[in-house]
Image: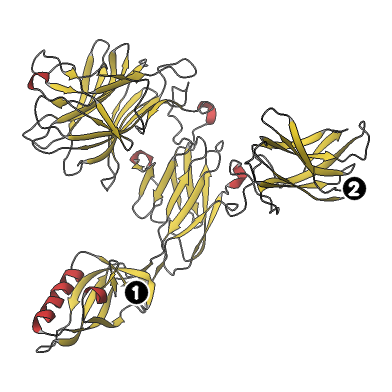
Amino acid sequence: MLIDGQYIEDLIPGYSTLQVSGRELLSQSIEKQTIGKSDGEFIQYARNPSREIVIGYRLAAADNLSFRQAFYKLNSILHGDSHKVSFNDDPSKYWIATFSDIDDVPKGRNAITSSFTLFVPDGIAHSVATQTADNMPYKDVPVNLLTGTSNQLASTSLSGWNEHVFGNVVPQAGTNYCFRVWIDNPTFDACAKLDCSDSSGSQIGWAQGNTISAGTSGYSIVKATTDSKYASIKCQTVYTFNHGTSASGSYGYKEAKLEAGTVPTPWSPNPADPEYYSDTITVPNAGTYPSEPVITATINGDDGVLTAINDQGSVLQFGSPDETDGFVKQKSERVYHLDFNQTPTGVTLNNGVTAFPYYEHGNDANVQSGPFGYANGIAYPSTERTASNYWNGPSMSGTIPPNSNGSNTANFQFVNRVNVDTSGPEVGRFEFNLTYKGKIVASLALFDDSPANDQLVFSGTLFDGKDAKMVFFDLLPRNYYRGGNYNAVITKMGNKLTFRLDRLDLGDGGIEPVDIGGFPAMPIDGWTAWFPGFSDQRGWSINWQDSYFEWINVDYWDDIPNRFKDGDVVKIDVANRRVLVNGAEDRTLQTIGNDWGGFKIQPGNNTIELLTSSWAKQCKAEVSWQEAWL
């Protein structure tokens, strides 16, 4: 018997599992009702109950002490809320079970047989292995290095020595390449051809494939091997040399494919082509009980909505199908990105703009001072703790140029990832500020300013036309907002400004958003990050892992930006009814009416259809699930 990944037989000398019962047929619980004087009864519903698994075991020990110690160990193994349990006769499945009952242990012997009972609340056996399916039917086919090709017949008209070009590819030195294309009913003899050029564009070689005679059809195949001089390979079809330069004709073509290797393989689109990803995923469930899937989608370009529909008609939708591409013709523009894999350049230290320039109990200035240390992609602020410095610590600041339309009042997001921890006697603060001409526009702060209390305060500050004023002050519940990784986020969408503190790795999700409506079109030209400690008090633990600012959906001001951008990874966890974007839960994506309960992988073949915005490319998607059995 395997429990939580270990065999009891390996943990307790002298223990052996003899027999297991309760994994066979599972009865149904039927709720019935008598209707008046009618014969029989009416079934209101039938449901699967829990089940109990009874394990018969033998335990033998050399002496009384060893016998008692074996039972101490067995108790420690079996007790607890729930365990993953599997058995050697079916190791591919496990049960979620809780130890619930025991049979009497024979007295007066150190070698006994008895039994204990495991309660299985869902009554289901689960697959140890995770199954996957995706919408990439060509992923196991050698990559087509040409983009924009098709398996549908098209035609071209050519004269003389002109060619039809499918594309140019930068080759790798010392590699074999094979180009194949279907040529259909050419007016003159035609073939595939590769032109090879060096870095100056001068032709250094060419190769011609087999001839497709006039009036016939077939594949023409040509091969080439590159060396270090090859900088470009041009793939094309041409007429052969047995016609005059003034000749004019046409032919059809399809399935053009350039690939590494010497043997051509069936046509496939390039991963950059929309045809590479299908709209549906076939999900074969070999279990006998429905499973709840996890759908992971990688967004391919901008997108406003992601919808999944199963073949039972259940729908999960995230985002808005009404978003149009009028405001996504220009991509979001990232102004800067600091990942701290190296010392940042183009920034200023200890001369930024803070929302808390003076100590609150007087006119004494708080101080920007101290260095940052860098290691393993993390910036470590170092504070100089002296009683006279009040709040003091290092700052980093930089400029934010306008977007490509010249606007510095557009939609944006400002994201900073930190790891923070504090306790009763520790104090600390961080600010992430957006500025204009040396004044605060918006400031997000998290701080603990009490050495006597274990607290975290989340606050936001805005420019009111004259000064920076705090607009909210939230004391966070410490049993939920503990030490760990957080994203501190300021976003502007239309005239709404949102401050967010996103928990990333503490379990149970967690987003603390504060929305400020009626936010004016304030310009932004700079940013500051400040990490002070207080006076000579003991400081909290803080490090800075990532920072970026981007203008979102440039030049669109009266609607939300596209919900998803290129490369976003959206994870839909049906069992836990959670949606994560790039690893952080986004509860604003939850839609009333989503049929979470009906979105199951039924036994047999299932189909999941994926829909994006009508103007967006199909996403890359994978469905994972664990099969289950009654």
Q: Is residue 427 left or right of residue 178?
A: left
Q: Position of residue 576 (x, y in %)?
A: 33, 53
Q: Is residue 26 left or right of residue 56?
A: right
Q: Is residue 153 visible?
A: no
Q: Position of residue 342 (x, y in %)?
A: 36, 31
Q: Is residue 222 left or right of residue 596?
A: right
Question: Looking at the image, which residue is at 26% across and 14% down?
Answer: 464
Q: Position of residue 284 (x, y in %)?
A: 51, 63
Residue 215, label in figure: 2
Q: Residues within 10 Å of mark 2 (few under 14, many from 20)?
A: few
Q: Residue furthest bottom?
A: 108
Question: Looking at the image, which residue is at 62% across and 51% down?
Answer: 142
Question: Looking at the image, which residue is at 34% across and 74% down?
Answer: 28
- Name the amino acid type tagged 2: Gly
Above or below 44: residue 274: above
Q: Residues within 10 Å of mark 1 (few under 14, many from 20)?
A: few
Residue 458, label in figure: none
Q: Secondary structure at mark 1?
A: loop
Q: Residue furthest front?
A: 228
Residue 28, label in figure: 1
- Name the amino acid type tagged 1: Gln
Q: Secondary structure at mark 2?
A: loop
Question: Looking at the image, which residue is at 75% across and 32% down?
Answer: 203
Which color scheme did the rendering employ for the protein? Answer: secondary structure
The CA span between labels 2 and 1 is 70 Å
- Towards the viewer: 298 or 588: 298
Between disc 2 and disc 1, the foreground one is 2
Q: Position of residue 339 (x, y in %)?
A: 36, 32
First along the sequence among labels 2 and 1: 1
Q: Is residue 15 visible?
A: yes
Q: Residue 483's quadrant in the figure?
A: top left
